Image: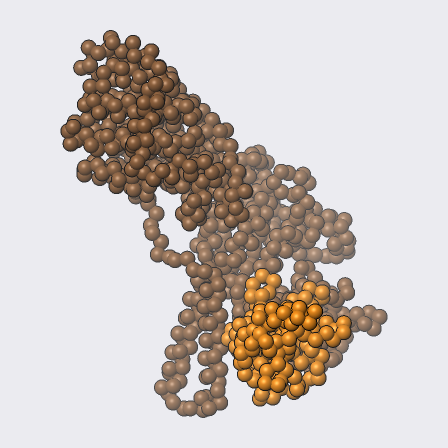
Amino acid sequence: MEAASVAQNLGQGAELAGKYLTFSLGNEDYGVGILSVREIIGVMEITAVPHTPSYIKGVINLRGKVIPVLDLRLKFNMNHKEYDERTCIIVVEVQGQTAPVQVGMVVDSVAEVLNIAAGEIEPPPSLGSSSETENILGMAKVKGEVKILLDVDRVVGEGLLQQFAAQ
Amino acid sequence: MAAGHKPLSELLDEMALKILMIEPGDLSIVGELLDLIEKLLPGRAAADIPMVVQQMAVAFKGALEKFIMGELADSAENYDLLGQCITEMQESVRKEGQPGEKILGQFCDNMKKIGFFLEPSTLLGPQGATAAGMGEPAHDTPVEKECAAASPRVDAGQIHAPASGLPSQEAIPDFLQDTDLLAGFIEEAFEHLESIEVNVLELEQSPDDMEIINNIFRPFHTIKGVSGFLNLKTINRLAHATENLLDDVRNGKRAMDSAVIDIVLTVGDALKSMVEDIKNVLQHGPANYKDTDISGFLASITQLQEGDNGAPPAEPVVAPALESLPEVVESEEAESQAGEEAEPVAPARAAIAKAARPVASPRAEAPASPASRPAADSGQKKIGASIKVDVEKLDALVNAVGELVIMQSLVRQNRLVSRIADPKLTKDFSQLTRITSELQRTAMSMRMVPIKQTFDKMIRLVRDLSKKSGKKVDLIMEGADTEIDRNMVDSIYDPLVHMMRNSVDHGISPPADREKVGKPETGTVFLRAYQKGGSMMIEIEDDGEGLNTQKIRKKAIERGLISESENLSDFELNNLIFLPGFSTADKITDVSGRGVGMDVVKKAVEKLRGKVEVQSQSGKGSLFMIRLPLTLAIIDGIIVRVGSERYIIPTIAIQESMHPERQNYSTVHGRGENLMVRGELVPIIRLYEKFGVESTYTDPCDAIVVVVENEGRRRALMVDELLGKEEVVIKNLGGLDVPGVAGGTILGDGRVGLILDLAGVMANTAD
């Protein structure tokens, strides 16, 4: 039984292995697959959009393109923190309903790009019935630190598209 | 073997190959065969081609033309027999022009089986009279035997060509082999069909104008040619038959009358739907393929041709039958013909040329009256100096240019930069501004197309409507060159059709009624387009009955839209027709008034952020005016401030703005707030409440209200401040879809401003 779960872990890990951009929210470290990251920008003035959940901060002008921005802290029900010079917006591209859409994610600070091997990745912990874990691809243990690998499509997709369909 | 025979035998080989490719219903290859056989005809053939082969060619050509005319059955058996005839011609060539009566007899026999009566003596010509009497015995030769003998020879002729020709014919939509070419054809065909329609309608005005007839003939010819090449058999046949009919007209064999015009128009429609079908197949796969039945069209075309020409004699004589055939002479083909004759015929090259240019059509020996015919190429379409660009690329360009303009103004307003008192810098800056705004204008204009295309469709519509209703209507169009946003073209079509129908159906009275009131029998409808102050105006004016304000009033009261006591101006009464469910036409006709009122038009126009109004004088006529933004990409808006947020309200919806006075403000049950604006109660919407932002003022009398109108409803939007008027580029919010917000835009400071969607803003307020 143990062998089977290890094999399963390995199989899953192999799929997830690769380069991740890591960033921090509070005292937690997260990672997103580098392939979905478009760019990292400093925080800029965000235009609030009415009738949206609080974690959607609004929209910004990304060189002539208007893109939505969501605050990951608020999305994960963490305490709000004032934006400072270390605050960043990570612009990711995910598949929208019809075409790929770009979305900004506000994070406390961006760390580095890590190459995470299959053996370092473990499946997400089960936190009871919490839906939080659905956003998590896996946990990576790198140099004694734990990085939470996010499923960007899920985080953003849920955050934007599904919420609005319900409204 | 004389050297001159080589091209001859190769020609025959090529013909044998073509025969193998023929399938019933595919006349294009018959056309190609005709092209080939021409080279063997007396007077055209090289001198060393035996007389008897030339005579056989004459007979062969006669038979081919009968296939095209539909007089001979278009069946596989008959094409097999034609193949045998080719074999016999090949045999004759091999025997150095002395085939003997056996072969000649078989040739005639096969022709007879097809249905083309021929005596061997005819083949021998005047000199060959000696052989004439001996033709008969050969008839007994079993055809099967000859068949068996013939097939290897035919196969031998096929060696030159890839063997793929045959199997590819088996699949149903075999035209799908070259989708690139096909896509090009579809686009082209639509253009051609459009031009046919326009020209036909023009022709109605001046039926004798040869140039217009040519302009109609040419696109049919092109469609026929290309469809033949692409193996679109039904389209090819239909276009071919129509082309033949038109050719009769060109040659003066029959007059251009309404019957011909009608058939050309209906054929044009049928072709359009067939091309549409193919487009479908291309997009959704071969399963969607359906073959259109064109026999009805072919029959009526043949009927038209025969009605005036007299049916071609069914006599078994070759020469007269030839003369009664339609002539098609095209300069293009005449040229290539000349070219091919000038040099030694190289079949391989000829085959390539064949593939590249349109398929041939029946042609008699010489043009009957070339002098009277205008040069066919005088109206040839110029090669437009334009390229097609992906809309996304265009949008990206427009985006980038917009950003450039903003960045430039940001740099200019930079505190340090603006402090520099350098005349050179000032000059350079103003130069830069000129360049960027020029760039912006150009980028914007790339999305624009003339409205002509849409207008041209109206010609046909009015024609059909007036025919159907028995009214006489002239359509006069002005300003068809006015440019409109490419994205608007499709959306404006339906409302325009609706309004045109309205004008013809309700506006213009029957000729008799018009005469009674002293108007000319023929009604006039004007269709105008022009630009006015950053808007595009489309006007539809008729000199018909006009709107009956009394009737409208009565109906409006009936429906509870206005009260008995309400005193409305004529203009206001007339514009009530745009309210839902309003139709004054007493009778419901086939064309309009099916319960779908003008509210549909109004909605469609408002969707394009436009406005529609009507002015009318009873008995004199009506004028419908549509005002549209020049482009959908840009919106003319007023920027308002609510707390720290800025919103853009589309200018077209704004009626007025004001500081409300206390005595005009009232509440219902202490909640529903209203403002008396020019004698009318208008509900107030507090934008800050609606959008959940902190505002400077909470008392409407301190703030400013903007009175807006949307879909007939008025609301007073409460804002803190009016910041100015600006033309802004509309952008979507990148995946966010929020009620009350139509989109975003980049404001002068580089930040995003939200554009209000008034329907959404009003929607959530209880009425």
Relative placement, left or right, of A40 versus B147 is right
Q: Can residue B747 be seen in this view?
A: no
Q: Is residue B469 above or below residue B135?
A: below
- Where residue B96 appears, x then y in whole percent? 18, 23
Quadrant that contains the C terminus of chain B: bottom right
Task: Please tell me which residue lies in front, B24 or A53.
Answer: B24
Q: Which of B662 and B414 is in front in this view?
A: B414
* Residue at the spot 40% in from the left edge and 78% down from the top edge: B432
Considering depth in this image, is B124 or B168 the residue closer to the camera? B168
Question: Picture quarter containing residue B685?
Answer: bottom right
Q: Is B176 drawn above or below residue B26 in the view shown? A: below
Q: Which residue is drawn at 58% across and 59% down?
A: B608
Question: What percent of the width, then of the height, locates residue B401?
Answer: 45, 72
Against B22, residue B628 (above or below) is below
Instruction: Please identify which colour was used for chain A in the image.
Output: orange
Is B207 on the left or on the right of A160, as rendered? left
Residue B680 in view of the camera: yes
The colour of chain B is brown
Q: How many marks?
A: 0
Residue for point 62% across, 81% down = A141
Instruction: Say which quadrant the N terminus of chain B sits in.
Output: top left
Give percent across and percent down for residue B711: 67, 59
Quarter of the image for residue B89 reads top left
x 34%, y 51%: residue = B383
Residue B687 found in image quarter: bottom right
Q: Where is residue B466 in the image (x, y as percent from the top left)?
A: 54, 38
